[in-house]
Image (tube, helix red, strand yellow):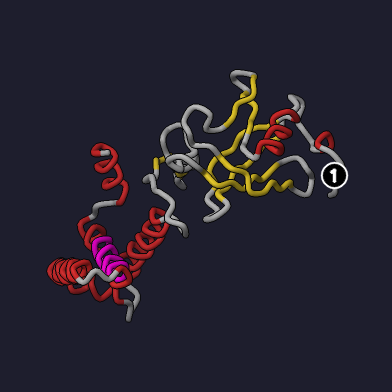
């Protein structure tokens, strides 16, 4: 659908259109806000995101007070022209949420209808570390439950806590040696091994990642 001007965007009865904000580099969905014609026009002309606050009934510039300004890379609209996707470079401390989190979408709705807060994470120029750890952790728990034959994680659980702890110790030592050798590639490789084996240890002990998140949040 090709539009000729901003008035052809399909705003709702309040004159607003939902705007999804996404990190242009790693594609994290950062937040959802609303725009009217004026805020969309200011966004286009300033290169920074401007929204309309439904509670305060006024325009607001994202990051004007916090410093977490969003520099617009691209604005897309959907096939019905009734919603926007804004790709940005998140500035400041790179946290889009007013709750001091990287993304506003940091709460997960579980299958039983309950909600839980997810660990915060910082962007690393690729896929966020918190997301990857969560995905690997899911695989570890799946292996623990199904114990598929031939899987290395199955082997560790079969051998028990002593074998798991031995591997944690070995990977910890190898990480130290890599750092001592001042080899960034080797450090990344060995620390990844260490993190994986720590996830296996946590699963064996029945300690969920959410427990670590709570502990680290208290210390932060």
Q: Quadrant of residue 18?
A: top right
Residue 115 image point, x, y percent: 43, 39
Q: Which residues are magenta?
A: 187-199
Residue 107 seen in the figure: no
Residue 117 image point, x, y percent: 39, 41
Question: Does 200 appear above or below 114?
Answer: below
Point 46% across, 57% down: residue: 125
Q: Is residue 188 left or right of residue 87?
A: left
Residue 187 seen in the figure: yes
Q: Total of numbered circles in the picture? A: 1
Question: Relative to the observer, which residue lies in front, 36 or 45?
Answer: 45
Q: Hey, which residue is sitting farthest right in the picture?
A: 4
**Residue under circle 1?**
3
**How dense is the environment of label 1, judged by Cα within 10 Å: few (below 14), some, or many (20 and up)?**
few
Point 48% across, 33% down: residue: 67
Q: Is residue 67 left or right of residue 49?
A: left
Prevalent SS, magenta region: helix
Q: Quadrant of the C terminus?
A: top left
Question: Relative to the observer, which residue lies in front, 129 or 118?
Answer: 129
Residue 10 image point, x, y percent: 79, 36
Residue 66 image point, x, y percent: 46, 30
Under circle 1, the secondary element is loop
Question: Relative to the observer, which residue lies in front, 118 or 72?
Answer: 72
Point 49% across, 39% down: residue: 96
């Amino acid at each position: 659908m090709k539009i000729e001007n901003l008035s052809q965007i399909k705003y709702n009865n309040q004159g607003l259109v939902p705007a999804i904000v996404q990190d242009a580099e790693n594609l994290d969905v950062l937040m959802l806000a609303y725009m009217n014609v004026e805020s969309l026009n200011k966004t286009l002309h300033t290169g920074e995101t401007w929204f309309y606050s439904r509670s305060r009934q006024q325009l607001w510039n994202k990051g004007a007070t916090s410093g977490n300004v969003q520099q617009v890379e691209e604005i897309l609209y959907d096939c019905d022209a009734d919603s926007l996707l804004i790709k940005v470079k998140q500035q400041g401390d790179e946290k889009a949420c007013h709750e001091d989190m990287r993304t506003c979408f940091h709460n997960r709705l579980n299958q039983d209808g309950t909600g839980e807060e997810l660990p915060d994470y910082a962007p690393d120029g690729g896929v966020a570390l918190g997301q990857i750890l969560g995905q690997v952790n899911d695989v570890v728990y799946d292996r623990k439950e199904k114990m598929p034959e031939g899987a290395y994680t199955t082997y560790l659980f079969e051998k028990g806590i002593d074998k798991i702890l031995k591997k944690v110790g070995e990977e910890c030592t190898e990480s130290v040696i890599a750092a001592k050798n001042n080899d960034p590639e080797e450090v990344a490789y060995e620390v990844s091994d260490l993190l994986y084996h720590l996830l296996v240890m946590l699963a064996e002990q029945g300690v969920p990642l959410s427990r670590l998140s709570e502990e680290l949040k208290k210390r932060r």
